[in-house]
Image: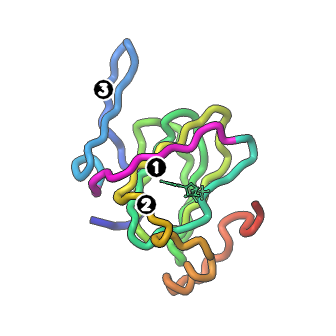
Amino acid sequence: MTGPWRIIELPRVNDARGNLTFIEGEAHIPFPIRRVYYLYDVPGGAWRGAHAHRKLEQLIIAASGSFDVVLDNGHETKRFFLNRSYYGLYMPPMTWREIENFSSGSVCLVLASLPYDESDYIRDRGQFLAETGGATGAVMGEGGR
Ligand code: TYD
């Protein structure tokens, strides 16, 4: 199942000893989990992403700290501030995404529907706009890293 980007509230088990959140593929999120990766030790001022995927579905979580995720489907752009480990941001295929404003020590956890495959990436913004029929401008600092 795909669909528009959206925030998914994940289950929480609150406990005086510490809180717990769990995620089951195809139950709490729309896809089976085939890969997990995470960004950490991100230096101040850095930004990541600036690409889209043709088939991949992903859920992005601020497992620790906070950051902004800017999403764009070629027609519409939206910025999400993630700072709670029980919210996941679902990204369907053909979503251009950029991540910035990482807080110190933050961890950006990503659940993905497929194994890593470079041929699934669209890294060229002009190509992305051609494939989406879109015309949105650069989300941020295009070519600036
Ligand atoms: P990339 O997805 O391009 O991240 P960013 O756009 O934030 O820089 O990944 C960076 C590098 O890591 C790239 O060379 C591919 C590699 N990589 C893997 O080998 N496996 C993975 O699952 C991911 C996400 C990246």
**Which range of residues does the magenta coloring cover?**
30-42
Could you give the CA–CA distance between mark 3 and mark 1, rounded to whole angstroms? 20 Å
The image shows a total of numbered marks equal to: 3
Residue 96 lies in the magenta-colored region? no
Which label is found at residue 91? 2
- In-image side of 60 versus 100 (left or right): left
Would you say residue 14 is visible in this rendering? yes
Please state which of the two labelled residues, at mark 3 or mark 1, is closer to the viewer.
1
- Where in the figure is residue 41, as x and y percent of width and height? 64, 37
Q: Residue at x 54, y 53 (%)?
A: 80
On-image quarter of the N terminus: bottom left
Q: Which residue is mark 3?
A: 13
Q: Which residue is mark 1?
A: 60
- Sequence order check, earlier mark of 2 and 1: 1
Main secondary structure type of the part rendered in magenta: loop
Local crowd size for mark 3, using a 10 Å CA cut-off: few (<14), some (14–19), many (≥20): few
